[in-house]
Image: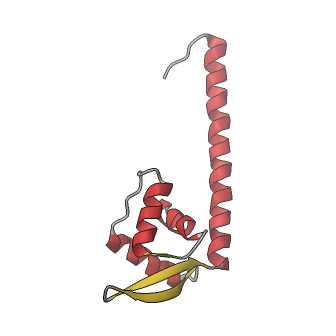
Amino acid sequence: MHESTFLILTALAAQPLHGYGILQSVQELSAGDVKLRPGTLYGALDRLVEQRLIEVDREEAVDGRLRRYYRLNNAGAAALQAQAERLHRHAAAADTQLSRRLGDALSFGTVTA
């Protein structure tokens, strides 16, 4: 799963959001590291709807423009949970390897950045 897909699903985990709300949430969740463009977002949303990971929750007219809200469905929640668990395992493996590296450096008296 791509990072942007993971963050979009994460943004929708708590509540339905419209496109601009998703853009803002992704930026917040990633601490500003990921800034999706609207074209990228809407392409991803269409793909996630096709994959049946999210659904259109509702549509409303705001200032003459249609605002579509999306929500995470059960399949999307399961996919997000599986990816989160996978990322946790990988992060733990990285921590273990880094600890070993630090331990080796300490035992030889050399710590380098």
| Lateral position of residue 76 relative to residue 37, left or right | right
Along the line of sight, which residue is nearer the eye, 24 or 33?
24
Q: Residue 110, how many percent across, how many down?
A: 56, 13
Q: Based on the displayed image, in which of its 4 quarters is residue 92 positioned?
A: top right
Q: Nearer the viewer, residue 15 or 74?
A: 15
Q: Residue placed at 51% from the left, 19% from the top?
A: 112
Please name the colour scheme applied to the rendered image: secondary structure
Q: Is residue 108 in view?
A: yes
Give the quadrant of the N terminus: bottom right
Residue 52 lies, with reference to residue 23, above or below; the image says below
In the visual, does 39 lie left or right of 28?
left
x, y percent for residue 71: 56, 78
- Residue 35, compared with residue 68, is above or below; it is above
Q: Taking the image as drawn, is residue 1 in sight?
A: no
Q: From the viewer's side, name the closer residue of 107 and 13.
A: 13
Q: Residue furthest top?
A: 109
Residue 79, image x, y percentages: 64, 70
Residue 81 x/y as whole percent: 67, 64
Q: Is residue 57 left or right of residue 103?
A: left
Residue found at x 67% / y 64%:
82
Q: How many marks?
A: 0
**Residue that lies at the very extreme toward the front in this rendered image:** 63
Residue at image x 51%, y 78%? Answer: 48
Along the line of sight, which residue is nearer the eye, 61 or 9?
61
Which residue sits at x=64%, y=15%?
Answer: 106
Reply above or below: 68 against 90. below
